[in-house]
Image: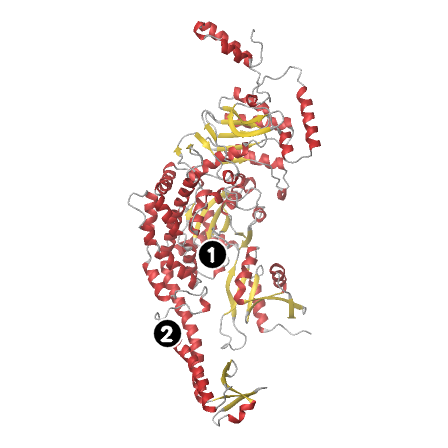
Amino acid sequence: MTDGPTPAMRQYYSVKARYPDAILFFRMGDFYETFGEDAGVVARELDITLTARGRDKNGDRMPLAGVPHHAADGYIARLVGKGYKVVICDQIEDPKTAKGVVKRDVTRVITPGTLIDSSMLGSAGAHYLMAIAPDRKETFGLAFLDVSTGEFFVSAGSGAHDCADIVSEVVRYRPSEAIVPESLAGALPARLENLGVTVSRYRDDSFDPGAAFECLCGQFGTATLDGYGCADMAGAIAAAGAALRYAQETQQSPLAHITGLATRVPSENMVLDAITLRNLEITTGIRGEGDGNTLLAALDVTETSMGSRTMRSFLIGPLVRKAAIEERLDAVEWFVDHALDRQALRAALGDFADIERIAGRIAYGNAGPGDLSTLRDSLRAIPDVKALFSGDAPALIREALDAMSDHTRVTDLVDRAIVDDPPALAKSGGMIREGFNAKLDELRHLATTGKDWIAEFQQQERERTGIKSLKVGYNRVFGYYIEVTKPNLHLVPPEYERRQTTANGERYTIPDLREKEALIATAEERLTALEAEIYAELIRTLAEDVPGLQATARAVGLLDVYAALAENAVRYGYSRPVIEESGRIIIRDGRHPVVERHLPVPFVPNDTDLDASDDQIMIITGANMAGKSTYMRAVALCCIMAQMGSFVPARHATVGLVDRVFTRVGAFDDLASGQSTFMVEMLELANILNNATPQSLVILDEIGRGTSTLDGCAIARAVVEFLHGKAVVGPRTLFATHFHDLIDLEDSLKRVKNFHFAVKDTGNEVVFLRKIIPGATDKSYGVHVAHLAGIPKKVTDRAMAILKEEAAREPSGGPRAPRYTQMLLVDTGEGVVEENPAVRELKNLNPNEMTPVDALNTLCRLQRLANGEDGER
C-alpha cells in the first residue's frame, strides 16, 4: 500500500487538472519544479537532468525536472519558442508566516502568442496572437493582437481554395499562435500548423459574437463598435473578442494598454498573397534560408524598434489611394532634401528605447527599473527631435510631431523616483532614489547604520574582553551571536549568555546585541517590502500615461521610417516615382533593389513599358540565366515600393496604381497536401486567372513547364490569350517563356509585344548581357548553362551533339521564317556578319527617284526579303 500525495502535490494535481495541455512550472522553494510527463518534456527540450522523487498517483516513481526560479525566464522562453504553453504557479503567501502548506496559485500563463517580457521577445518585430472565428459560409473573421504593444486589428478571409486568404494573412503577419474554437472542424488547423503556427483550441463560448461585443465595448469603454469600422463584421468581432479574452486570461490582467481596434479592409491596400510574398521575397527568403536577402532587410535601415515594425507594416500593405501615397512620398522627399536634419534625426533616434513595448509592460505591471530609466532618457530627447523641424515640413511629418508629447510628468516622476543606474529587475531592490520617500530613507539608514553598529560592537568587545579573535556572526536560526574559540573561553565575561556550542568553541549573546538584532532584522525586511510597494505604486501612476506613450511611439516609428526611406534613396540612387490613376507602368533604368546589393559587378538596369490598354503583355524569351526572373521581380518590387511610399531603384518610374500583384515563379511541391509541382503550378495559376483585374500586375515565369511540351505550350498560349481577351484593357503582364512558338502571338493579339534578353554568342562562349531589347529569340542556351553548373563535359558535349542533330532536321514544309533578333548579336569570330538582302537593297535605293506606287511595291518586296522569301514574287 502506498502513501497518498503530500499536501503540496495535491496542490500540483489540482492546478494541473485546470491546464492539462500546458507545462506546469510549480514553485517549490528556490526552484520551479515540473513533474511526470511535463518533466520528461522539459528535460528533453532544455537538455537538463531528469530525476525521480516520491511516488505518483499510481505508486510509480515520479519523474522530476527543475530550474532555478531566478533563471526561469530563459528556460520558459526556450519552451515557448518551441511552441509549448507554460503555466506559472507561484507561492502567493510568505512561507515564514504560512500555517501548514504554503498557498500557491497560477500567476501567469505564457503562450507563444502572448509574450510580453522583454527577455522572451526575440526581436523588435510585431508578435501577434491570431484568432479565427467562423462567420458566414466559407468566411472567417480574423483578429491580430500584439500583447506587447497593444496593437489590435481585424480583417476577414475566405476559407475557399485551401484557405488561401487566411494563409496569406498568416504569411503577411507571421502570428506565433492562433486560437480557434474547440469545435472547429476541417483542414484549417492543420494548415496553420504546417505554416509553423502554434494552434490552441479555445472554448466556443468565447467566440460568440454577442459575448465578444460586450467584452470589446467593456475594454474600450464604449457602447458600440461603430467607430472602429467593424460593426457589421460579426466574424471579426467574434475573433477580436476571443483574442482579447484569451490574452486577459493568460496574462491574469485586464491589459489596459489595449485601448482600440483597427479594421483593415483589403480594398484599402495592395493585395500581396502568400505566394507573392514568397516569390518576391518580401519579408522572408524563398527557400526559408532566413531574412537576409529580402526586400524588408534591404529597406529596413530604421533606428528604432518602433520604426522597424512600421517599415514592415508599410511593406506588406502598400497603399492604393494616390493621395495617401503622395503624402508619404512628400515626407520622404523632405528628408531627402534636408540631409542634415535627416542625419540629426537618425542619430537622435539611435538611442531610443522601445517606448511602445515599455508602455505595454507598464500597463501590465511588470516593467523593470531599467525599462523606466531608458524610457526617461528617450522621452527627454523628444524636445530636441521636434526642434529639428521647421514649419515647412509636409503634412505627415507635422502630424507625427503633433502626436509626440514631451511627457514631462513621466520624466520628472521617473527622475525623482529611480536611481541613475538601476537594476534590470525590481525584485533585485535598490532602485528607489534617496529622498523620494522619507520612510524608506529611514529604514535604509537604520539597515545601513545597524551593520556599522555591528562592526563597531565587535571591535569594542575585542578591546573590552581582550579576546582578539572574537567575532560577531549571523545565521537564520540564532540571529546575531558572539563567537569565542576554545582557547579563549577563560576570558569570557560573566554577562555573556551562552547560546550554542560548536566544534571550535562557544556562541554567546548579550541584551544590547539582541535589541539591535531585532531592529536590524526588521529593518531589512521592512525595507524590502516598502521599496517593492513604492515601486508598484509608481508603475500604477505611470500606467495613466500609457495611451500618450503609445501615441508618441507610433509617431516616432513613422518619422523613423520616412527618414530611413530617404536614407535608402540617397545612399542607393533611388528616384521619386510618379503615381498615376492609369494603366501604365513606365520604368527607365530599373534595378532590383536586393540583387544589386550583392553583385560583385554593377547591376545592368533595364526599361519597362507596360500599358493595360496598349502594351499590356510582354512575352519575354531568351537564354537561361540571362536575367528574365530578376527583371520581372524588379518591376514588381518597384511598384510595391512606390505604393508603400518609397522612392524606387530607377532613373524614372511612372506607376499606374496596382491593386494586386500576382506571381507564378519557380517550382514547389506541396508534400503536406500530396500535390505535385505541376498541380501546385496550376492551382496558383487558377488563382491568378480568376482574380486578376485590369489594375493588377501579373508575373508569370515558365507556365506549363511541368508537363509535356505539347500540353505545356498549349496551356501557356491559352493563358496569354485569356489575359489579353478579358476586356478592352487587361492586367499588365510579364510572361517569361521558353515556348518559342508563343512569339507568334504578337501578330494576332494587338496588346502583346515580344522582348528578349541579349546574349553575345562567339560560337565557343556565351556572354549574358542582361539587357532586355525588343523582339524575340528562339535560343535558350540550356547546354551552356549546364556546363556552367558543372555538369560533366562528357554529358554537355553529347547534349550539344544531339542539339545539332535535332536542329538539322527541318520539317517537311521547310524552315520556319526567322522571327527573332537575337542573331544581331552573334559574333562569328571573324568580325563579318552576313548582310540581309533587304538591307543591301535598301542601301541602294534612291527615294527621290521613286513614285508613290514604286515605293509601295518596293516596300512589299523588302518585307518579303526580310522574311527570307523570294523578293521577286
What number is the disc on residue 152?
none
Q: Are marks 2 and 1 in contact (CB under 8 Å)?
A: no
| Way the structure is coloured | secondary structure
* Residue at image mark 2: 441
Task: Tell me: 516 left or right of 810.
Answer: left
Q: Nearer the viewer, residue 612 or 623?
A: 623
Task: Tell me: 369 left or right of 703.
Answer: left
Rendered-image quadrant of the C terminus: top right
Instruction: Estimate the spatial distance between the alpha carbons at disc 2 and disc 1, rounded to whole Å.
Output: 42 Å
Rendered-image quadrant of the N terminus: bottom right
Amino acid found under the numbered disc labelled 1: Arg
Q: Position of residue 633 (x, y in %)?
A: 51, 35
Mark 2 or 1, nearer chain start: 1
Q: Nearer the viewer, residue 399 or 771?
A: 771
Instruction: Determine which quarter of the picture holds residue 812.
Output: top right
What number is the disc on residue 245?
1
Q: Position of residue 516 (x, y in %)?
A: 43, 84
Among all residues in the image, which is located at the extreme front?
Answer: 830
Residue 597 seen anywhere in this rendered image of the structure: yes
Q: Position of residue 336 (x, y in %)?
A: 37, 41
Q: Crowdedness of circle 2 by 10 Å Cα count: few (<14), some, many (20+)?
A: some
Residue 55 seen anywhere in this rendered image of the structure: no
Amino acid found under the numbered disc labelled 2: Asp
Q: Is residue 44 above or below residue 579?
A: below
Among all residues in the image, which is located at the extreme left?
Answer: 391
Task: Tell me: 584 left or right of 391.
Answer: right
Q: Nearer the viewer, residue 689 or 398?
A: 398
Q: Nearer the viewer, residue 241 or 469?
A: 469
Q: Is residue 824 above or below residue 194?
A: above
Element carrying mark 2: helix
Choose mark 2 or mark 1, whichever is in front: 2
Q: Position of residue 447 (x, y in %)?
A: 42, 77
